[in-house]
Structures are given as C-alpha cells and as structure tokens.
Image (spheres, rainbow, N blue to C red):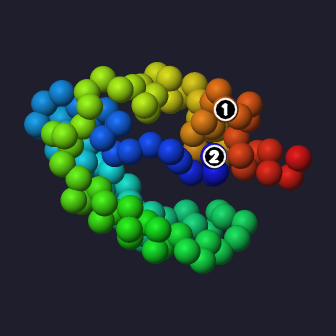
Amino acid sequence: MGRGVVGFGLAELDWGDTPQERAAAKDFLLRVLDLALSRHRWEELTYEPPRAEGYLRTYRAMVEEFDPATARAGTGVLPKPREAAMASCVRHRVLDALPFWQACVFCTAGV
C-alpha cells in the first residue's frame, strides 16, 4: 500500500445505480484527473514526482475507456460522504486511508 489508492479495479468502485449517476461519476473522476494533470497543488509536494504525469495519463486513459455499466453494484470500496469526512485530514485536504493509518501521511511524514 502506497500513498495513493492501490489494489482495486475500476469495476469495484460504486459508480451509481442509474446511467445518469454512472455518467456523472465518470465525468467527475475524469475532471479530477484533468485537474491533477494540470499540476494543481503540486507546489505543496515536498518533491518533484518524475513519473506522476505519465501514470496519471495512463490512468485517465483507463477511466476514459471504462464502461461503468460493467461495474459490480454495491461493492462499497470508497467511503460514503459522511465516512470520507471522518477520514480526511483538514490541514492537507487528503483522505487518511483509515483504518490503515492512524494519521495523515503528510502530517506524519517527518515522524
């Protein structure tokens, strides 16, 4: 397990129950990836990620080609909004991946 989301397939995510919800979820994920590809907030990193842009482009292509209608419904891989809020670091605005870690990876990086 690394600093990112590791060890899941796109079909395991909850894309929604209706075609409209699935389309909205896919659009949201593609917009998030486009934002990351624009290097949004990269200045907050403590290093220059040499391969991140290539990985993001590859992942974006995978999401673009993925058909959410093929996903398994109700897998519950990602936290619901209320659960996600409890697992977020307010200071760094990232998910903490609880219960795997007890604190934010950035808050505890120097510990």
Picture quadrant of residue 63: bottom left
Q: Position of residue 68 (x, y in %)?
A: 21, 43
Q: Position of residue 2 (x, y in %)?
A: 64, 51
Find residue 50 and name its label: none
Residue 30 placement, left or right of 92: left
In the rendered image of this protein, does residue 105 appear above or below residue 35? above
Q: Position of residue 44 (x, y in %)?
A: 65, 63
Residue 30 placement, left or right of 42: left
Q: The residue tagged with tag 1: helix, strand or loop? A: loop
Q: The residue tagged with tag 2: helix, strand or loop? A: loop
Q: Which amino acid is tagged 2? A: Met
Residue at coordinates 50% horizontally, 23% vertically from top-left?
83
Q: Which residue is mark 2?
A: 1
Residue at coordinates 35% horizontally, 36% vertically from top-left?
12
| Residue 94 shows in this picture | yes
| Residue 24 shows in this picture | no
Sequence order check, earlier mark of 2 and 1: 2
Q: Which amino acid is tagged 1? A: Phe
Residue at coordinates 53% horizontally, 70% vertically from top-left?
52
In the rendered image of this protein, does residue 25 appear above or below residue 72? below
Residue nearest the observer in this picture, 89 or 47: 47
In the rendered image of this protein, does residue 13 appear above or below residue 73? below
**Residue furthest out toward the bottom:** 50
Whether label 2 touches label 1, CB < 8 Å? yes
Residue at coordinates 59% horizontally, 30% vertically from top-left?
87
Label 2: how many Cα within 10 Å (few below 14, some 14–19, many 20+): few
| Cα distance in 3D space between marks 2 and 1 | 9 Å
Find residue 100 and name its label: 1
Q: Position of residue 108 (x, y in %)?
A: 80, 45
